[in-house]
Amino acid sequence: MKIANETKVGILAIVAIAILIVGYSFLKGNDVFSSDYTFYAIYDRVDGLTESKPVLVNGYQIGRVSHMQLQADGQIRTEFKVKRSYAIPANTVARLASTDLLGGKAIVFELGDSPQYAVDGQELDAGIQRNIMEQVEPIQRKAENIAAVLDSVLNSINNTIDKDFQRDFSRSINSIANSLQNLEGITSQLDGMVVSERTRISSIIGNVESITANFKSNNERIGHVLANLDSITDQVAKANFAQTINSANKAMADFQSITDRINQGQGSIGMLLSDEQLYNNLNQASQNLEELIADMKARPGRYVHFSVFGRRND
């Protein structure tokens, strides 16, 4: 049976179209010869996500973005194709994330801990990871604020630095240079002094070595001296200070008892200090004695008689 040329051309055209469709689908990442799980997620924005972008778990591709559709409320419903060999927990989050510094996008599955797995056609929780520019934006704003402050400070400095300030600043720099030059001269003098006094320095070092040698040779005697000093301090520490303090306390108590008895009028001293009648008698006796002495001085003849012929009556 002979096939017409028109039939051959038609068959070839159909095969070519089929190959074209399959190749296009394959280039988009669709495997037309295998069946995959289909999952969905709804995003407020997709920021450059396109179909055939990978679906990743810890950087490993398990699927692809198969379809995206804009909803009436402005949200984007995204469809994923995941190989059936991978089980996805039901509480997995499909997060839109950046994969490189150039802004490449992908869907990253943050696997949940649910014991139940997502079924074909299930809608997963959606999330959006902040891209690098959004993370850098706060730092950029702070840098702009700092730049503005620095600009203001520099303008203030420029306004402050006048000719007088520049002249004073130049003088300060010259003073610092002179100080450094003087310091260099001092160091040079010290170097010269060290060279000229090298013999004396060597002698001093020798004396120090001699002293240390003497200490070393008399180490045993120094040890005996320290031991004797330690013994003396131990003897002083072991002295019966407690008994001495108790004796002093007892003496103070006896003295306090005596003063209490005197204050209470007990004993001769107490009676002498507290008996008013005794005080008056002593005062009267002292007065009579003074009068008697005065009378004896005035008229001694009344008290002393000496006569060869005997006493004469007054």
Image (tube, rainbow, N blue to C red):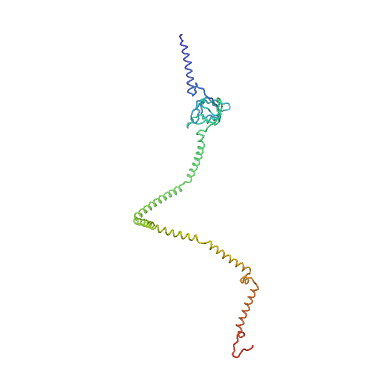
In the drawing, does residue 77 fall left or right of residue 203?
right
Position of residue 194 measured from the top left corner of the image (x, y, whole percent): 36, 54
Q: Is residue 139 left or right of residue 217?
A: right
Question: In the image shown, does 94 or 67 lie closer to the viewer?
Answer: 94
Residue 70 percent location from the top left of the image: 55, 26
Q: Is residue 53 above or below residue 296?
A: above
Quadrant including the C terminus = bottom right
Residue 132 image position (x, y, % from top left): 50, 34
- Residue 75 in which image quadrant: top right
In front of the other: 25 or 188 = 25
Q: Left or right: 13 with respect to 123?
A: left
In the image, 170 versus 241, the foreground residue is 241
Q: In the image as oriented, which residue stretches furthest toward the top?
A: 1
Up the image or down, 178 lies above or below 154; here it is below
Query: Does residue 73 lie above or below 157 as drawn?
Result: above
The number of numbered discs placed on residues in the rendered structure image is 0
Residue projecting furthest to the right: 277
| Of 54 and 222, the residue lying toward us | 222
Q: Position of residue 298 (x, y in %)?
A: 61, 83
